[in-house]
Image (cartoon, rainbow, N blue to C red):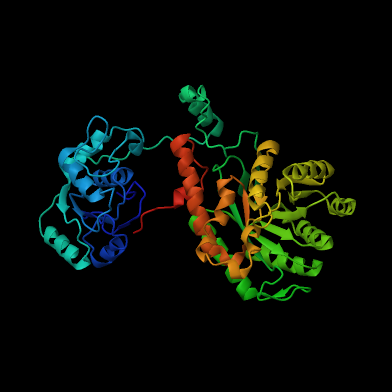
Amino acid sequence: MSNWPFIAGDYFVVNKKSPIAIVTCGSYDLPKELAKLSDKIAIVGFCETENDGIAKIIQNLVSNTHIRILIICGERVLGHEPGQTLISLHNNGIDKNYRIIGSKGTIPILHPNYFHGDDPNKFVKRFQRQIKVVDAKGETNAKKIISIINNLSEQAISPFPEAPILPPIPKVEYDWDNCVRRFQVENRIYLNKGISLLNPLIFTGKLRVFEIAGIKIGGQRGEYPIVLAGTIFYKGDKLVSNHSKGLFDKAKAEEQIRKQDENSLNYEIPAMVHIVGETPEALTNYLLFTADFTDSPIVIDSPILESRIEAMSVAKDIGIDNRVIYNSIIKIDSREQTLINEIGTIEYSIILPFDVKITSTINRFEEIIEFIKGSIKYPIIDPGVSILGEGAIRALHTAWLMKNHYGYPACIGIHNLQSRIPESKKKLKELDFSFDYALPSIYGLDINLYGPIKNANNIFREVAAVEAAIADENINTIGVYPKPPHPYYAINIGRE
């Protein structure tokens, strides 16, 4: 019972030994209210769907023999009808095609996929025998529902006498190549018709994976979560009082970095700190402060070559260069190579061969990568981002294309996509933290330089949802799981 409930979902657990479970259908705020009002509830949550949602409910019910009653209440979900479908399931079961008999829902099918390949009938029949359904559909008044709970609690209700039926343990497969081969074999009839079925954004080239301070970057789309790198100390950052000397409000800087670290932990999205300094003194001050405050990798950045070199030299001197990314090498520069050679090989560096044409970007990259051999151990591709209307989305395609061909991890400063839009035109504020910041994940990139670190609270949540969705796609099509830790394993977990 300590691990119950076994199926993740959006619910609240109150008393695992209570006989009463509640589903509030389309009333999304009601579960939290009921959980606060009564300790006589085992589990309470809403349900929007007449298929996978119901499959999760019955698996959590029959895996706890203390639960004997399911109260169905809350608002109706038009088209899906989960409340009516649950009652039909209890009364009629499912047919040979796994369709819930008598349901008015659009797709009331309990497919074996929802049970990790096990027979749904086993769970349905146990649900029918173990659980009594109380029909309170449409009731949204918390006090009236509590009254129903109290009346039921007065009855002597014993646990179901048979052993619980536990949800099957899914076979977790992490091997991308093996899963893709199996998927292609299983669907060769479609391949023969010229239909791949694979998402076209899946990489087909040989990919490299680098590890920076315990964080892995690279690999397949959805294999590892994207890394979110928030920027601090940039020109215009109100934390900084003197950009030449690198003087800043340490308390506020600590608070912003701490918030990013907390979001990283909560959403299982790895984080980096992107520091920008205008002078060698400033960038070095920022580096020492950041390295002392957080264990996250650090991206050092400056428009001044001497600033980057000085900070990198200090990183080597104090032994933290294995968690510092040099940002960035944008052209063949013999002076930069000489200075790098003087301090020794750099472990990680972003290569930024920006140009207005894809072919030109590729040519510049090949020239730079050949030039830096022996100077940079682990290069990371960044094609650069133009403003909207000048090839912003092309940059994402270029990053995907180059990662697929050359195999190196790829990053992108996605904040540039919308940061250049004049303020007067930023009317759709709700899009700022939901669309453009998710794009690097959709394209399978590895580091998302998302802009000011102060925005971490908004961006981590949105990106975690997209990462979990990509993982869900991979699991349900190819059968391959993301490498933990990953937002897929942290998201949609029930709360006690």
Query: Where residue 336 appears, x then y in whole percent?
Result: 86, 54
Q: Residue 378, relative to residue 26: is it above or below? A: above
Query: Where residue 300 appears, x then y in whole percent?
Result: 73, 59
Most foreground residue, 410 or 2:
410
In the rendered view, does 147 fall on the left or right side of 424? left
How many numbered badges does the structure rendering display? Answer: 0
Rendered residue at 81%/66% (across/down): 280
Q: Residue 204, relative to residue 218: is it above or below? A: above
In the image, farthest residue toward the left: 155
Please tell me in which quadrant of the rendered image residue 170 appears.
top left
In the rendered view, does 52 fall on the left or right side of 278? left
Rendered residue at 21%/55% (across/down): 18
The reply to whether residue 295 is in sight is no
Most foreground residue, 70 or 478:
478
In the rendered view, does 123 fall on the left or right side of 472? left
Rendered residue at 64%/48% (across/down): 396
Q: Residue 401, relative to residue 43: is it above or below? A: above
Please tell me in which quadrant of the rendered image residue 118 appears.
top left
In the image, farthest residue toward the bottom: 241
Query: Where residue 337 appears, x then y in whole percent?
Result: 86, 50
In the rendered view, does 349 fall on the left or right side of 33? right
Query: Where residue 288 appears, x then y in whole percent?
Result: 72, 65
The reply to whether residue 206 is in sight is yes
Q: Quadrant of the C terminus?
A: bottom left
